[in-house]
Image: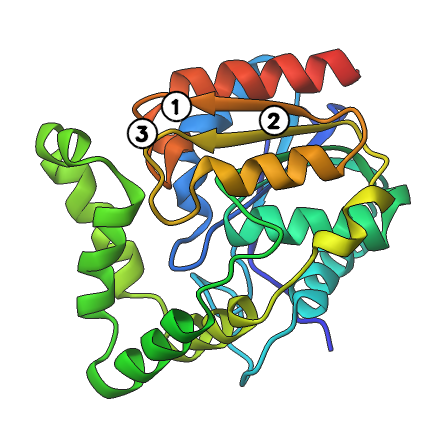
Amino acid sequence: MSVAVHHVLDGPADGPVVVLSNSIGSTLHMWDPQVKPLVDHGFRVLRYDTRGHGRSPVPSGPYGIEDVGGDVLDLLDRLEIGAVHFVGLSLGGMTGIWLGQNAPERVRSLVLACTSAQPGNTQMWLDRVKQVRAEGMAKIAEGSIGRWFTREWIDAHPDEAAALREMTATTPAEGYTACCELLADLDLVPGLPKITAPTLVISGADDKALPPDHGRVIADGIAGARFEVVDHAAHLGSYEQAERFNQLILEHLEGVA
């Protein structure tokens, strides 16, 4: 059953809508570096907190990818929005893949960033669930920052790193673990050829969580998809290399328009 996720709208009321979908352990604020550039180019930006995260409801797990994808469709219906450009990172990118496969009429284009169609590492995700249930989110948050950013970025931006670490530390444990369980056995690879939306896949060269090989599988599976690898970017490449990500996203969206 869908839940009414928390959302924020920015930009002109008549602009083409771009939906930004967050990673596990984050909120819609992970997209702060993208909002102004998109709005300045005439887009209406719709950000939301994935269920179990931020200010969205936290239903009991487990969650399926059809649940987080269904929440997006419910949000668009509530706002009376038809087809959108969809930009997702990590879990948000997987949500975009599901939408492209199951609701193609609602997807004008896709940007799939630092993500995977089959994350793998099943036992790692299940071990993380056990750790959160035993110890809470604080230790997870410390590890997340080390995956999200390169050490050079963390050392150069200690205040931002601390704020982003707190974003994960304050994520509801139930929402986080339910999404971990979702990721543990997810496999969207067989349906990749069904996606017809113009697609850009972006990977971070230094992403140890979901290395570029994952992005390549997605790009190879979607007809006509463009694949880009961004240097000096770990898992939250949209934040660490915001200028380059913004350039790629805008090129893609304006090319489709």
In the picture of the structure, the residue carrying the numbered disc 1 is 242
Does residue 25 sit above or below 252 in this rendering? below
Direction from residue 49 to residue 226 in the image, left or right: right
Image quadrant of residue 201? top right
Kindly identify the amino acid type of the residue bearing the numbered disc 1. Answer: Ala
Q: Measuring 43% from the left and 16% from the top, which residue is drawn there?
A: 244
Image quadrant of residue 249? top right
**Foreground tag (3 vs 2):** 3
Q: Earlier in the sequence, mark 1 or mark 2?
A: 2
- Residue 11 marker: 2
Depth check: 49 or 151 in front? Answer: 151
How far apart, in angstroms, are the residues tagged by discs 1 and 2?
A: 19 Å
**Foreground tag (1 vs 2):** 1
- Residue 240 marker: 3
Image quadrant of residue 240? top left
Direction from residue 257 to residue 186 in the image, left or right: left
Q: Are marks 1 and 2 in contact (CB under 8 Å)?
A: no
Direction from residue 186 to residue 119 in the image, left or right: left
The spot of residue 122 in percent (x, y) is 47, 71
Q: Measuring 28% from the left and 48% from the top, which residue is drawn there?
A: 147
How far apart, in angstroms, are the residues tagged by discs 3 and 2?
A: 24 Å
Kindly identify the amino acid type of the residue bearing the numbered disc 2. Answer: Gly
Depth check: 102 or 15 in front? Answer: 102
The answer to whether residue 168 is seen in the rendering is yes
